[in-house]
Amino acid sequence: MQFFSHLKDNLDNLEIYHFLEDEMSKYKTLNHEDIKWDKVYEHSLEILQQFSMDARISNYFVLSCIALNNEESFRIMSKLFEFLVDILQNSPQNLGKNAGILNAQKKKIKSVVEHFIIETDRLNLSHYPQIIIDFNHTFKILGKILECDFKEIQVKQELQKSEVISSTVKQVEFHTQSPNTNSLNDREYRVFFNNLAFELLENNKDNLNAYAMFVEAMWGRIRTLPTHNEGITQIKCPDKNLTQILLQNDTDELEHIKRFMSNLVLNPFWIEGLKFFCEFLHKYNRLNASKLLNTLTREFLIQFKEISNLKFSNGKSICEEQILNYFLRQDIDFDHIKSKTKKNKQNKIDEILLDINTRNYNNSLFSDINALIEMARLFEEKNMQNNARILYIRIKDLMEKTLLKDYLLEDYSKITIKSEKNVKT
C-alpha cells in the first residue's frame, strides 16, 4: 500500500480536510458520541495516501482505527507505521522543512503510538497475532529512531476449551473514544458494568447492587432474541468442560462468583448456567442474591417468551422445560422482591439499574450522567455510602473527560467532594 511521501504545508483547499477538522473538534466533548468514525477513517486515509504525510492526520486515522476495531483497519495502520519508519530512516526531511517542524512531527508520532499501545489492552488484536507481531517489529525500530522504548504489545494465547475465561476484566478507559455508556460498544458496555459489580463485591459479597450490575452487563444491550432458522440459532452451546469448572468446588468464593459472572456475561442466553449460578449462591447461603437473580431471570424469560422454542447451534434447547419451570415457579419468598406498586418499583435499586436505558430517553451524555447521579443519590438515601462513592468517582471521571457545560459545573463540584469523601465501614 502506497502513502504520500512528504508533508504538505496547507490542506485548506481540501473539502475532506475541513470535514475531518469539524468531526475531530467533537473529540472528548459532549458531542463525542456523534463523531462519524467511518468517515474519519475514510478521509484521513485518503489524505495520507494522496495529499500529505501529516502526523496530525495520522493521529485522526489511528483514533478511527481504534474506534472501528477491525482487522482491515489495523492491517492498513500497520502499513502506515512501516511507511513512517522508512521515511524517518531514509528521508526525514520529507516530514519537515526545518528541524522544528520535524521534531514536532516526531513528537506527535511518538504520542500516537503510545496511545495506541495503551488501547490494545481492550481491542480485539489477540485475534490477529500476525498483526501484533508486525506492530511490535515496527515499533521497535520506530522507538530507536525516536529515542524511546515503546511497550511491547502482548500476544494473548487463545483459550483452550478446558480453560475458563479469566474473571479479571480490564477497566474501561473513558479517555478514549467512549466518554459515556451510550457510545461504548457491546464489549465495553459489558466490561464497564461487570467491573462495577466486581468492585461492589469486594466490600460485600451479599451486595444486591453488584448482582444487578452484573445483570445489566449481561442483558442491558439485548433488545431481541437471536436470529434463527426454524428455531436453530447460531449461538454455540457452552461446552461440558466449562460446566464442570463452574460446578467444581472452589475455596475462594469471591473468585468463583466472578468466574460465574464473567462467563455468563459472555453467554447471556445460557439459561442453564444462570440456574447453576443461583444454586451456587444458595449453597453458600447468599440467599438474597440467589432470589434476586432468580427473579430477574424470571422477568427476562417472561419478556422473551419465545426463548423456550429456540435451540443452540448443536440443536440443544436454550431453555429446557425443567429449567424454565425452575425460574417461573411461584414462590412466596420472591414476593417481597417483585413489587406490583409503582411506588415500590421506583424505589427498587435493581429495577432502577435495569431501567437505565429507558430512562436515558434521548441517548445523550447529559441524560446519561443524570441517570448515574440518580443511582448514586438513591444509594445515599438508603445509607449505602460506599456504593454511592464508587459511582461518584465514575461520574467525576466521566465529566473530566468531557467539555462541561454551565449546567453541569455545579453538579461537578458537588460530585468531586462526594467522590473524595472517606467512608467508614
Image (cartoon, rainbow, N blue to C red):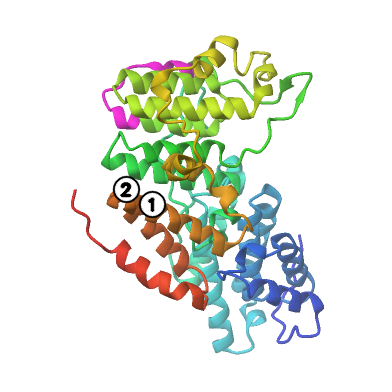
The residue under the point 39% across, 25% down is: 290
- Work out whether residue 118 or residue 76 is closer to the camera in this orientation and state it: 118
Q: Is residue 202 visible?
A: yes
Name which residue lies at 35% across and 23% down.
Answer: 281
Task: Check the picture and name the quadrant holding the N terminus.
Answer: bottom right
* Residue located at (26% from left, 42% from top): 203
Callout 2 crowding tier (Cα within 10 Å): few <14, some 14–19, many ≥20: few
Q: Is residue 278 magenta?
A: no
List the residue tagged with mark 1.
378
Q: Quadrant of residue 130?
A: top right
Name the residue rendered at 64%, 14% in the picture.
317
Q: Position of residue 184 (x, y in %)?
A: 57, 52
Q: Residues within 10 Å of mark 1 (few under 14, many from 20)?
A: some
Query: Looking at the picture, which amino acid does disc 1 mark?
Result: Leu
Q: Which region shows up in magenta?
A: 241-255
Q: Nearer the viewer, residue 396 or 260?
A: 396
Which residue is tagged 2? Answer: 382
Residue 302, which numbered label?
A: none
Instruction: Specify the amino acid type for callout 2.
Output: Lys
The residue at the far left in this view is 424
Query: Between marks 2 and 1, how big is the CA–CA gap?
Result: 6 Å
Seen in the picture, residue 145 relative to 296 is either above or below; the reply is below
Against 193, residue 247 (above or below) is above
Q: Are marks 2 and 1 in contact (CB under 8 Å)?
A: yes
